[in-house]
Structures are given as structure tokens and as C-alpha cells.
Image: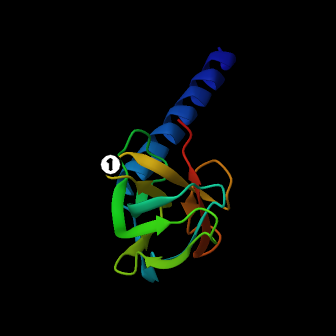
Amino acid sequence: MDKIIKNSFLILKIIFIFAASLLYGCSNFGGNLIEGAKTTVFVTLELDSKSEHFDERVLMVNLYEHPNFIADVQATLVDSTTSYVDYIEGTKPFTLKLRLGESSNIKEDHKYYLSVVILDAKGERTHYGYKNGTDGFSSVLNESREVFIILKPISN
């Protein structure tokens, strides 16, 4: 009988902890603004030296935020910029410095990432931006406000 009571108590404790964590997560869904902290990111973009010649392409840089602990939630666009770029093969690849996110505040329970692409005249991606030149998620605002992105050609 004592074993049943102990097990029941343990199960109730687990349920309570689970319910409390669910309530905490739901109550913070919208994020808590950290007063005065802007989502400003300083981005240095560099075209990969293996790129071939191209004219009048569109560079798109987007800063997104998404809730930390909630799965299957669409990211929200925080800031975006576009510009025209071109490159002559054999010349030094271009480097651009940008600032994004100056008009928004960091939300305490959110993560931030960049999406950087170059589009051709058909709207198809020809280059994709990689943080520090390595494959993977281009998360920002977790260690520094500065990020280095290399734009690499997309292989067909």
C-alpha cells in the first residue's frame, strides 16, 4: 500500500511539473521585450571567390525571429534589405557591410537568424549565404551582434 501511495505521489509530482512548464511556455509565447535592447545585427557579406560572372542579380538579406521552445511556429520577418549586385569573374569578389534590425527589440525567449540569397532574373536562387562560410543555420544575436556571411554558389 505504501508503494502505491509513493508511486501515485511521484506521478502527481511529474504531472504538476509538466503542467507548470506548459503554462510557463504558453504565458511567454509573445516574448518579453528587453527594454532598450535592439535587434541590430552588423552583417559583413563576401562573395565566394569560386563564383562565376553574373550581371544585375538581386541580393536579399532577411532577419527573422522565432520562439525558442515552441515547435512548428512560422518565423517572423524582423527586417529585410535588397540590393542589386554583379560580379566579373577573375576580379576581387565584392564585400558589403549592412545593418539590420534597428527598429525592433530583442524578445527574451526568441532566437534570431539570417537568410541571405542572390536571385537571378527568373527569381531562382544562385547563391546562398553561410555564416562564417560553413553550412548550417545562420543564427545571430547569441554571441555577438556581428556576423560574417560568405555567399556560395548553389550547385545544380
Q: Residue furthest top?
A: 1
Residue 155, horizontal then vertical, whole percent: 56, 39
Which residue is at the front of the view, 145 or 61? 61
Which residue is at the front of the view, 142 or 28? 142
Q: Residue at x 35, y 66 (%)?
A: 78
Q: Residue at x 42, y 47 (%)?
A: 125
Q: Residue furthest bottom?
A: 36
Q: Is residue 108 visible?
A: yes
Residue 101, horizontal then vertical, whole percent: 40, 75
The quadrant in which residue 9 appears is top right
Q: Is residue 63 visible?
A: no
Give the residue pinned by disc 1.
123
Residue 124, horizontal then vertical, whole percent: 37, 45
Label 1 neighbourhood size at 10 Å, few (<14), some (14-19), many (20+)?
few
Which residue is at the front of the view, 41 or 119? 119
Kind of residue indicated by mark 1: Gly
For numbered disc 1, what is the local secondary structure?
loop
Image quarter (top left, top right, bottom left or bottom right) of the N terminus: top right
| Placement of 32 over or under 99, stated as above or below | above
Q: Residue at x 68, y 17 (%)?
A: 3
The quadrant in which residue 11 appears is top right
| Placement of 68 over or under 39, stated as above or below | above
| Placement of 92 over or under 67, stated as above or below | below
Which residue is at the front of the view, 143 or 6? 143
Q: Describe residue 68's horizontal placement relative to residue 51 as left or right.
A: left
